[in-house]
Image (spheres, helix red, strand yellow):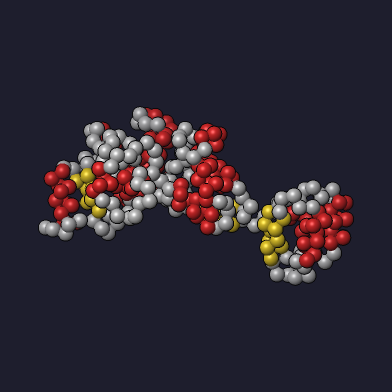
Amino acid sequence: MSAREKIFIIKPGQTLKLISANLEKESIISNKTYFILFTKFKKAGRNLQAGEYLLSGSKSPEQILEILKKGKIKLHRITFPEGLNINEVAQLVEKVGFCNKREFINLCKNRAFITSLGIKAASLEGYLFPDTYFFSKQVSCKKVITTMVSHFKKTFTKEWKLKTENMNFSIHDIVTLASIIEKETGDASERPIIASVFHNRLKKNMRLESDPTVIYGIKDFDGNIKRIHLKKWTPYNTYQIKGLPMGPIANPGALSLHAALNPAKTSYLFFVSKKDTTHKFSKTIQEHNKAVRKYQLRKK
């Protein structure tokens, strides 16, 4: 028997006879008849679980049976970075071979499914928690999504929920704000300061004027934001609407959620990119315009 480990797949609905024949064909067991009889003796014929396994002929038939009974399937690692939107998460899921991109997106917008997960939103944008996960290749789209949303719920603790209420926000508001902070942040240390700018603007009833919100509302964005985009009304364009957009624009990580709930204490109302991943923060429009000339227009 081959001692080299190899991938062995049991598909849903496969019979003991077919599984045993395949095990013998792959040189994982030497005698399919013995394996069938042994499995039936152990009354385990209906307990062999579908999935992808890493097996070798160096294991005894008894050990192989135990692995198949317990469903010790091979798991594949997938990492979702902070700040991806639903479409980007779906592309990544399909790329590694877990499930179909279109099915994933449709589920994330299915009201009945969203409600079943206990999320009060029109879509699951913002609630697919970015982290590293391990799934089998046979995992369903529902399982991937349910696992990510469950991780979000564990991360958004009771303390955070209480703080959200005390700040007169809903959880959806905080997730939405955190998603904007996530997309605006280049340097992680700036998250609380960026959060303070948006909180200060909300308190003064100023528009947030965040480019990433505009981009999210543009279909087939080509990477070049123009003045016409800033003037076009969408429920996400914070140059046109006051307050928060209708929902999150990405899936924020724990640091951005924390920043949304714990903004730095500043008087800043503006920031502009210094084109080195950091920003220049300003308290007045005059200071801001000066910073724009220096860092964006390269004028003194």
Q: Could you tell me residue 198's position as x and y percent?
A: 28, 40
Extreme residue in the left direction: 300
Pick whichever, 235 or 50, lies toward us: 235
Decide if residue 155 is in sight here. no
- Picture residue at 82% right of the left edge, 56% below the top: 17
Decide if residue 183 is in sight here. yes
Pick whichever, 292 or 267, lies toward us: 292
Q: Could you tell me residue 98's position as x and y percent?
A: 58, 53
Q: Could you tell me residue 131's position as x and y percent?
A: 49, 50
- Picture residue at 50% right of the left edge, 45% below the top: 105
Picture quarter with the C terminus:
bottom left
- Picture residue at 45% right of the left edge, 34% below the top: 121
Task: Give the answer, above or below, for where 240 lies relative to 182.
Answer: above
Pick whichever, 215 or 194, lies toward us: 215
- Picture residue at 37% right of the left edge, 31% below the top: 169
Task: Give the answer, above or below, for where 244 lies relative to 28.
Answer: above
Q: Report the side of 272 relative to 112 (left or right).
A: left
Picture quarter with the N terminus:
bottom right
Q: Could you tell me residue 96's position as x and y percent?
A: 55, 58
Task: Give the answer, above or below, for where 116 lies relative to 44.
Answer: above
Q: Report the side of 56 relative to 193 (left or right).
A: right
Number of marks in picture: 0
